[in-house]
Image (cartoon, grey):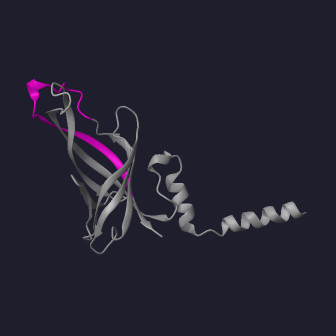
Amino acid sequence: MKKTGLLTLGLAALCAQPAAYGQTDSAQKGLPALIQVATANTLVLETKASGTIEYQCSKEKDPLTTYKWTMAGPKAELSSRGGEKIGDYSGPPARWAHKDGSFVTGSQVAVSPNGSKNIPLQLVKADVAGGQGALTGVSYVQRVNTQGGVAPAKKCSADNDGEKAEVSYKAEYRFWKAN
């Protein structure tokens, strides 16, 4: 009897947790631990992104004879789950801007691979969150469900040093605020 009573009490306590905890848990289910947001944060906005990432062929610093496609910056439209455009994403530095005038800039904390044909999943810590609106007070941004966006397959060498190429990508960005 005592075990059943304790189990019932424990289940009741779990069910009494605020809805934000359930939302946080479900939003992070299946994500690599490296890019998960601390439990003291609540998911406040999810967007879809569609755009391009620009790469530039350039000489590496070490060794000086090696060339590599380097990310120059992204340009994407942010949309609601219903498909309505609600903002833009650009960089560097990484900047998400909402149509209501709010924005957030951030610095990468961690990445996790998402296959050889997709840019990695990413966790970004907000540096500045400004304006009044949906992105005010954002503490973290996650990039999940990435599709495409990797450096061009075309050879990068002294023959095309300085050449730029745009690659299409899609992703979801999740915005979190500290509780």
Q: Please identify the residue farthest to the bottom as the structure is shown.
A: 132
Q: Residue at x 74, y 64 (%)?
A: 10
User: Does residue 98 lie above or below 32 as drawn?
Assistant: below
The residue that appears at 86% across and 60% down in the rendered structure is 3
Q: Which residues are magenta?
A: 151-174
Hey, which quadrant is residue 7 in on the image?
bottom right
80 inside magenta stretch = no
Residue 25 is left or right of residue 111, and the answer is right
Q: Position of residue 50 (x, y in %)?
A: 28, 49
Place of residue 177 in the rendered image (x, y in percent of width and height, measured from the top left): 42, 66
| Image location of residue 29, percent across then percent down | 53, 50
Which of the 4 quarters of the picture holds residue 11? bottom right
Tally the marks: 0
Asked which quadrant contains residue 22, the reply is bottom right
Front-lying residue, 83 or 142: 142
Q: Position of residue 147 (x, y in %)?
A: 35, 40
Q: Quadrant of the N terminus?
A: bottom right
Residue 171 lies in the magenta stretch: yes
Q: Residue at x 30, y 62 (%)?
A: 127
The answer to whether residue 38 is left or right of residue 96 is right
Query: Above or below — where is 95 with respect to 136?
Result: above
What residue is at 50 percent from the left and 55 percent from the top? 27
